Amino acid sequence: MLIGIIAHESGFSRDTIRYYEKIGLLRLPKRARRENNYKEYSPAILSRLRAIKELKNIGYTLAEIQQVIMSYETGGLDCLAGKAQVLEKVRLIDQQITQLLAIKQQLLEAVVDCPNHCKITAILDNTLIGI
Amino acid sequence: MLIGIIAHESGFSRDTIRYYEKIGLLRLPKRARRENNYKEYSPAILSRLRAIKELKNIGYTLAEIQQVIMSYETGGLDCLAGKAQVLEKVRLIDQQITQLLAIKQQLLEAVVDCPNHCKITAILDNTLIGI
DNA sequence: TTAAACGGTGGAGTATAGTCCACTGTCAAG
DNA sequence: CTTGACAGTGGACTATACTCCACCGTTTAA
């Protein structure tokens, strides 16, 4: 497959894919060229890009993704350290949620406590119950 | 308070605090100088920095933080539009929490579900097969 | 008194993650 | 046979959010 297809299928731009190649996140076999010098991307590369996309969505940096994929390829993820890594991530997420809840609480208090009770307060009281 | 104290209390470096001043995220009164030209930071500034830290932790960019604080300070909270804005913010926070919970779920499943594998292995197994 | 520690300013440099551009080569349709 | 879409390369540029440095003045403790 040529880069246009890969870009379309993966959802990354050509430039981004080339950027990933440049930083070594994607490695093409040396022979992965057609006679006209166009790069030939394997389905494996596409899979990898999809994995990268998912990992990015979870909030991993490219460096972390590189690590994770490397660990995976060397079988490193079947170990305790791998699990510890995920659990750490979960811990961070919990922290974030806690903070979000705190901020939300503050915001709601700011809305409800507001001295000038306009009509909206009633609406808010109804819509925000249980939050 | 001088910048050293503020830095220590807020957890930001001096450079970062000065950077925030430069981009206008922090605004000192013109008269907030001692006779020796040292800047005098008020407790309000410290509060603001703590707010910034919290907002940063939950993933806001400095630009967003600037917006949020501005809305807050212009008394936006006392009027209808202000309340709508807060509500919108609350909605976004809820969205974020939902997303975080989903991610956490995925991560936990990745760890717990696969008997021998951990973490991302689930994602990777699905996307990287054949690499 | 003098040296460390702190403060101020301006400007350069860093890291991350791309994005854009110029210039060139290739291919397929009309 | 030309035109447009696509491919390749190298390098410049962007935004975000700092971080560091040089060079200067001030304060404080030995």
Image (cartoon, coloured by chain):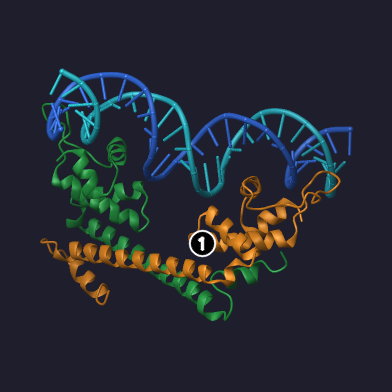
Chain colours: A orange, B green, C cyan, D blue
In the picture provided, is A13 more to the left or to the right than A37?
left
> Taking A98 as reference, is D5 above or below it?
above
Q: Nearer the viewer, residue D6 or A75?
A: A75
Question: Which residue is depicted at the point 57% across and 61% down?
Answer: A68
| Quadrant where the N terminus of chain A is found in the figure | bottom right
Rendering coords of residue B80 (x, y %): 22, 59
In the picture provided, is A83 more to the left or to the right than B89?
right
Type of the residue with mark 1? Asn
Q: Nearer the viewer, residue A82 or A110?
A: A82
Is residue B74 among what the camera can see?
no
Question: Which residue is depicted at the point 86% across and 46% down?
Answer: A35
Question: Which residue is depicted at the point 35% across and 46% down?
Answer: B63
The residue identified by callout 1 is A57
Q: Nearer the viewer, residue A84 or B81?
A: A84
Rendering coords of residue A23 (x, y %): 61, 46
The 10 Å Cα crowd at callout 1, few under 14, some 14 to 19, many 20 or more, is: few
Rendering coords of residue A41 (x, y %): 75, 55
- Quarter location, residue B36: top left
In the picture provided, is B104 more to the left or to the right than A112?
right
In the picture provided, is B117 more to the left or to the right than B60?
right
Is residue B51 among what the camera can see?
yes
Question: Which residue is depicted at the point 45% across and 70% down?
Answer: A87
Numbered-mark total:
1
> Taking C9 as reference, is B48 above or below it?
below
> Taking D27 as reference, is A59 above or below it?
below
Rendering coords of residue A59 (x, y %): 48, 60
Q: Chain of mark 1?
A: A
Tag 1 secondary structure: helix
> Taking D2 as reference, is C30 above or below it?
below
| Quadrant where the C terminus of chain A is found in the figure | bottom left
Q: Nearer the viewer, residue A79 or A60?
A: A79
